[in-house]
Image (spheres, rainbow, N blue to C red):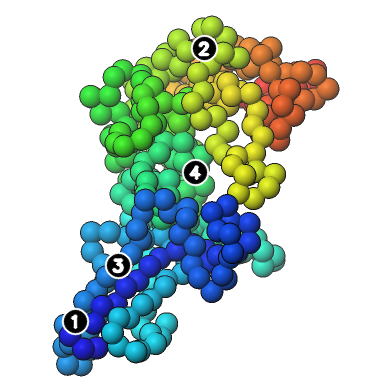
Amino acid sequence: RAGGTRVILRHAEIMQHAGLPDVKTADPAMIYVGELRGARATDVYTCSGRAGGETWQPSLTYHGFRFVEINVTNSGVRPAAALLTALHFHSGVALRTHAHFNSTTLNRMQHLAVSAQQSNLQTIPTDCDQRDERLGWMGDASLSSESMALNFEMAPFFSWWVRHVVLPEQRAGALPDVVPFVRYGGRPADVSWSAALPSVAHAVCDVYGDTETYREAASAIAALVDEVGVEARAGLGKMRTPYGDWCPPPARMGKGQGRKPSPPLTSAFSYALMVQQAAELARAAGNASEGARYASLGREIVSNFHTAFYVGNGTFDTSGTQTANVLGLALGGAPDVGFAPRR
């Protein structure tokens, strides 16, 4: 292209379609960037006019996208898709699982899950790769730690990240929502977010049989359990829960979040789960007495969970949400219909 010609690339996840809250008349031939918030997701390259053509890729940034809008100024040239190559940029963790199903849908879902996880492994586990966050939100790491450990060789990555979660400058027990702690979130974190520390250590131990990550984090996990225990003294039904069930889909597209269980329920569940995981980790590391102490505490928390949230007839929480009942099942089910402790 002639020197001075500008190539403008705008990146997006989706094309415009009906139902978008901020688009009155959707044009399916145009990209949609509303959910990117403050992220420009735009690259501008000015051609030098070098003979034989030019090759360029952005540096010091990355974009999460499925579509690219290309504009070439002052040229009258219609750009061709063949001139573009998408580079899937992520931390160099090796794929360890190759799953294949008889269902095309399941194969596609597994491919999308693996690709999405790769896109959010950027030295730290991030929440998203497209909008103006791309931060180490702990809640995302907590929910995904086991599946990431199954899909990839994550032990070195997680071990490195856990060291940053338990940095000495973190106030004992009170972990932040985001690691590194920048821009968003609070401290102490929502319990389901701080639960990432034992969840990640548990995934590394459970999948790889590696207890070293736990050994490095054992004192921090103990401090976390104590910190959350202080929060729970007033009762599981009163636990502080800034985020809770984040975030259920709305009944109608574009109408915010859907119905949630009572906010403390997710914090109470995560408290029970982190103590159960701490019990398993302590036993795996050869500390039987510590494992027994955590196991006893875990049984007590589960009993209190039933007192606070079980409403009878196999139902947890008055909200009647799927989340409430699934979390109740994960802790062993309803106490009056053949309850058996999870651990």
Could you tell me which secondary element the residue under label 2 belongs to?
helix
Q: Indicate the amino acid at tag 3.
A: Asp
Q: Depth-wise, is mark 4 or mark 1 nearer the camera? A: 1
- Looking at the rendered structure, which numbered label has been put on residue 43? 3
Badge 3 element: strand
Assign the N terminus to one quadrant of the image.
Answer: bottom left
Location of residue 174 in the rendering, given as x and y in whole percent from the top left corner: 36, 20
Marks 1/3: CA–CA distance: 15 Å
Residue for badge 2: 232
Q: Residues within 10 Å of mark 4 (few under 14, many from 20)?
A: some
Q: Amino acid at mark 1?
A: Gly
In this rendering, the answer to whether 210 lies above or below 3 is: above
The reply, left or right, for residue 216 in relation to residue 311 is: left
Q: Earlier in the sequence, mark 3 or mark 4?
A: 3
- Viewer-side label of 2, 4: 2
- Judged from this view, the residue extending furthest toward the top is 234
Element assignment for label 1: loop
Q: Secondary structure at mark 4?
A: helix
Of circles 3 and 2, the one toward us is 3
Residue under circle 4?
144
